[in-house]
Amino acid sequence: MAHVLVVEDDPSIRSALIRTLGERGHAVSSAPDAMTGLREALDNRPDLVVLDLGLPDLDGAELLRMLRAVSAVPVIVATARDDDASIVRALDAGADDYVVKPYSAETLDARIRAVLRRSSSPDEEQPLVVGGLYVDPRSRVVTVDGESVELSPREFDLLAYLAARPGQVVSKRELLTEVWRLPYGGADKTVDVHLSWLRRKLGENAQEPRYLVSVRGVGVKLVEPAA
């Protein structure tokens, strides 16, 4: 049983989620606005947050950024916004998954179970070390040669995914699916842009890579720098 916090302003949807998720074995708490949701998340430490973006006091994407600054709790955005820009913004801000209204209780429950399985994987909690690169998934701390590196939530997720597979070529499609949770193509530029930002913060570039090596037509791999 998981403790799920539902942040949703529509009382009928909120009540329906409390009922249907409760019927599926979850303990459910709720909040009708962003600031109440933030307090609930910090005070009661839920296992997962289901977050609507259209909240009355603050946009849900802003709440997500605030939450990500202080917590690694998994977040599923559940909203009526179905445009690619909103989806990418939410995922870049740190959402673990994104579902579009209307959705079935079965679909949301399956997404909750999948996100919780990923977030509770013991292998993903162990610090990752590749050469002078240190990535700690639990604290979301990154250092290079002992120097701290500040990353956005999505940059961290991208780096951690690659660091967990050192030397393995990972395709952009796999990154979109596993890091951005986008099960469709057409957004390769999103990966390219984030890789560019990540390289810059790691002190390298595509022409002179140290850790992030592109394999033309295949993908990218994270390697230990040559001596």
Image (cartoon, helix red, strand yellow):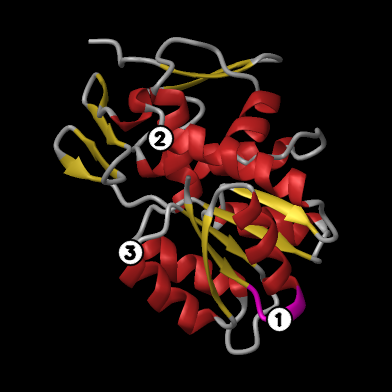
Residue shown at 39%/78% (left/top)? Answer: 39
Q: Is residue 3 left or right of residue 16?
A: left
Instruction: Magenta stretch: give its range.
Output: 8-12
Q: Which type of secondary structure does the marked residue at label 1 adopt? A: helix
Q: Where, by quadrant of the figure, is residue 226 drawn? A: top left
Q: Which type of secondary structure does the marked residue at label 3 adopt? A: helix
Q: Mark 2: which amino acid?
A: Ser
Q: Is residue 110 above or below residue 222?
A: below
Residue 10 magenta:
yes
Looking at the image, can residue 10 be seen?
no
Q: Mark 3: which amino acid?
A: Val
Q: Which residue is nearer to you in this view: 150 or 138? A: 138
Residue named by callout 2: 120
Residue shown at 47%/48% (left/top)? Answer: 2
Question: Label 2: how many residues lie within 10 Å, few (<14), some (14-19) or many (20+)?
Answer: few
Looking at the image, can residue 151 be seen?
yes
Which is closer to the viewer, label 3 or label 1? 1
Q: Position of residue 6 (x, y in %)?
A: 58, 66
Q: Mark 1: which amino acid?
A: Pro
Q: Position of residue 5 (x, y in %)?
A: 51, 64
Q: Where, by quadrant of the figure, is residue 194 drawn? A: top right
Residue 70 is tagged as 3
Residue named by callout 1: 11
Q: Position of residue 30 (x, y in %)?
A: 54, 72
Q: Where, by quadrant of the figure, is residue 208 drawn? A: top left
